Amino acid sequence: MSGGLDSCVTAAISRQNYELCAIHANYGQRTEKRELAMFNAQADFFEVADRLVVDLNYFEAIGGSSLTDLTMEVPDQDLNSRNIPNTYVPFRNAHFLSIATSWAEVIGAERIFIGALWEDSSGYPDCTSEYYKAFNKLINIGTRPSTNIKVETPLIDLRKSQIIKKGVALGAPFELSWSCYRLEQPACGTCDSCALRLRAFAEANLIDPIAYEDRAHYAKV
Amino acid sequence: MSGGLDSCVTAAISRQNYELCAIHANYGQRTEKRELAMFNAQADFFEVADRLVVDLNYFEAIGGSSLTDLTMEVPDQDLNSRNIPNTYVPFRNAHFLSIATSWAEVIGAERIFIGALWEDSSGYPDCTSEYYKAFNKLINIGTRPSTNIKVETPLIDLRKSQIIKKGVALGAPFELSWSCYRLEQPACGTCDSCALRLRAFAEANLIDPIAYEDRAHYAKV
């Protein structure tokens, strides 16, 4: 759970059928403190007792992304572009899933839920259903024969506006979520992540409850 | 490079055709300090300038292995057993390979070498060629379309005695390697890792240059 909107809805979905344990990663991203605070607020809301917060400081040493390298600039987003933006953190989700798999194998958890989506995403390569299929194969081969863990991606084929509607139906606390890549409070409203979020709320005919510096730029769509 | 024998030989092999950058992980294993010292000694020997040392403290929080949980005991090894011993760190190699993939994608490296082997191994599930094949598929799907990284496992089908002979032929500095799971100096000689190492040196008709508390137990074979 990043503290963002997608993992918040994923938690709301998965808790219908499972007891939740939650993982959050600090990886030197610009909005690390805000995301951690929102993770804990959401985990409190969903009454998740068992939490694993990991510090992946090495992502700053690896660099190569404007999220973790403060000398690079987070761009204003062009939602029509099909290029992978510089906010891409190389191969990041494999780190999160590996941690989840190790923990799941130790505690005996059966499912790993991740709020990845492809439509209305930034086009990161580690957000396709093909990718999660390949990861499930890796888990199957690379854990004890008696271990049975599967990654599930309940949002992967949904538009972000559909995710928001589903979240509303399940009572997901969007006021406790954070998506902005640039700022910790208020959200900028113009980075890739804010743009996708604001456009989706507009599409769903709903008002995003969090504060923005520039809400009008993408919400007008 | 763990600081052990297999990654030492893998470095000796891969440097024949590639310029090396080296990764080492501290993950709360019992012999962390000794392994880090041997990693740096080997990297000095092989003249590797670019090194990434990562701290994966969260493995202690995850637990489930006698290498990272000090309340569990590292067993004397039974080389005839086919059970996965409690030294197995769940899904560990996926963490190492994910870090290597992220770094490789940023610096433009083409190959990731890992000294995994199956014969004469402890039977960990993340040490089979099938596993590395699945990881290569994950890399191919989960990185930028222009990225071309492949994991190579030059030792995977070798017996450990063959690995030692190959290392000797290439001048690998075994005196700068550490394999013991239990102790930092001297090696115990009776844990899983010492047992496999001593038996392999005996098979190769060579003397292991490092110090042992009990060398006779497995070297007699």
Image: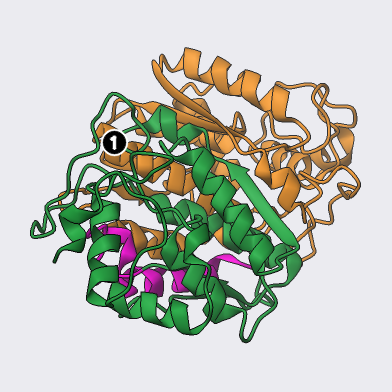
Chain colours: A orange, B green
Q: Is residue A130 visible?
A: no
Three-letter amino acid code of the residue under disc 1 = Ser
Quadrant position of the C terminus of chain B in the picture = bottom left
User: Quarter-wise, where is residue A218 in the image?
Assistant: top right
Left or right: B188 with respect to B144? left
User: Quarter-wise, where is residue A111 in the image?
Assistant: top left
Is B141 in the magenta?
yes
State the residue at coordinates (22%, 60%). Answer: B123
Left or right: A136 with respect to A173? left
What residue span does the magenta drawing correspond to?
B117-143
Q: Is residue A68 visible?
A: yes
Parent chain of label 1: B
Residue designated by label 1: B66
Is A128 in the magenta?
no
For mark 1, give the secondary structure. loop
Is B101 or B117 nearer to us in this picture? B117
